[in-house]
Structure formats: structure tokens, C-alpha cells
Image (tube, rainbow, N blue to C red):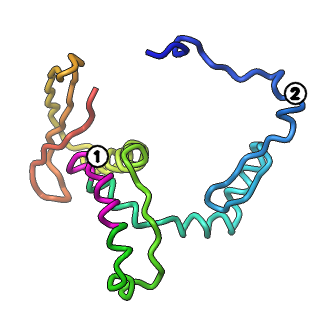
């Protein structure tokens, strides 16, 4: 634990009155524009057609990589993006693309965030829909890892109407 980790950081209202922070603004990375840091302005900007169009243009090449990392180690994503970027340097691969190649930036931290905040909730919702009201069993597996952290993995076994088979699937880990 770091030296300052025990101190809780809180927003102080008096900071808003200081001249240094009077004209602080937000920045939309998708549209590359500055915004006023008011909730209503941020909501209005999120609903503009420009923002929605720019959000659709977000590099979709990044999406399959976290899915790949869920089946391997997350460390492999660092090397995989380097390999993909090395193919971008090769002129033969660019002739098959409609757009010029760009550098692909996806490393462990971003990949972990995508898995945790996008893929996992989506898979959980799919699992809940698939189980529905059918009967199920819960399987628990308790273990201790190398760093003496105790882990509890919860799996669910149920009959899937979609697959027409009994399925055992990972649910969550504590």
C-alpha cells in the first residue's frame, strides 16, 4: 500500500470558487471537441447526431481482441496488437482494405476494462435469458491461489432450450 493510500480524496465545493478552476471544461475523445462540464451539456452532446456518428466510427478492429483474450491470457493481447500493427506496415495487406491502416492500440488495461465492463455483463445477460425459468444447479469450487487469496468460483448447470442440451457454464468468481 502506498504512502497516501489511506487518505480518502473528496471533491471540495470551495475549489469551484477558485479562479484556477473557474473555466474547467470537459473533452469528448470521440468527437475531439471541448464541452462545458455541466450534466445537461454532456447529456445534450451525447444525443447529438455528430457524436453518434463519430461513436459508430470507433475502431471496430479492437472488439475481437478482448474476446480472444478471454480464452487465453490477457498478456497475449500486448503481443497480438504488435503483430497486427506489423502487418499494417506491409503494403500487400493494405490493398485488401478500403481504409488506410492505422495503429491499433489495445493493451492489458484497456482489454481488461472491455472484458469487465462490456463482455462480462453481456454474457451474464445472455446466460440469465437462456436459463429463464428452467431448473438449474449451482456448482461451487473454492480454492486458494499462490498469493493466498481465497477464491470461490460459481458455475451453473441447466438445460438450455437454445442448444437443446444440458450445459455447465461459469457464472461468477468471488
Image quarter hosting the N terminus = top left
Q: Position of residue 134 (x, y in %)?
A: 21, 44
Q: Quadrant of residue 29?
A: bottom right
Q: Which residue does the numbered mark 2 point to in the structure image?
A: 18
Residue 123 or 20: which is nearer the viewer?
Answer: 20
Read off the magenta span.
69-84
Q: Which residue does the numbered mark 1 point to in the structure image?
A: 74
Image quarter hosting the C terminus = top left
Q: Quadrant of residue 137?
A: top left
Question: On residue 102, which mark appears?
Answer: none
> What's the residue at 13%, 43% (across, down)?
168
Residue 34 or 174: which is nearer the viewer?
Answer: 34
Q: Quadrant of residue 156?
A: top left
Residue 65 or 43: which is nearer the viewer?
Answer: 65
Report the residue that reaches farthest toward the left: 166
Q: Main secondary structure of the magenta part?
A: helix
Residue 157 or 49: which is nearer the viewer?
Answer: 49
Q: Position of residue 17 (x, y in %)?
A: 88, 27
Task: Give neighbour class at mark 1: few <14, some 14-19, many 20+ (Cα, 10 Å).
Answer: some
Q: Is residue 63 magenta?
A: no
Label 2 vs 1, first from the N-terminus: 2
Q: Position of residue 18 (x, y in %)?
A: 87, 27
Amino acid at each position: 500500500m502506498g504512502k497516501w493510500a489511506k487518505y480518502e480524496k473528496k471533491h471540495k465545493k470551495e475549489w469551484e470558487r477558485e479562479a484556477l478552476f473557474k473555466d474547467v471544461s470537459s473533452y469528448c475523445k470521440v468527437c475531439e471537441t471541448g464541452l462545458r462540464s455541466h450534466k445537461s451539456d454532456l447529456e445534450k452532446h451525447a444525443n447529438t447526431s455528430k457524436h453518434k456518428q463519430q461513436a459508430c466510427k470507433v475502431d471496430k478492429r479492437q472488439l475481437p481482441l478482448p474476446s480472444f483474450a478471454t480464452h487465453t491470457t490477457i498478456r497475449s493481447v500486448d503481443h497480438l496488437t504488435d503483430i497486427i500493427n506489423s502487418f499494417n506496415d506491409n503494403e500487400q495487406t493494405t490493398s485488401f482494405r478500403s481504409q488506410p491502416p492505422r495503429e491499433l492500440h489495445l493493451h492489458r488495461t484497456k482489454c481488461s476494462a472491455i472484458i469487465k465492463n462490456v463482455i462480462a455483463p453481456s454474457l451474464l445477460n445472455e446466460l440469465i435469458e437462456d436459463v429463464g425459468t428452467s431448473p438449474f444447479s449451482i456448482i461451487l469450487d473454492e480454492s486458494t491461489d499462490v498469493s493466498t487469496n481465497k477464491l470461490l468460483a460459481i458455475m451453473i448447470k441447466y438445460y438450455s432450450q437454445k442448444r437443446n442440451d444440458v450445459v455447465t457454464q461459469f457464472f461468477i468468481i468471488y
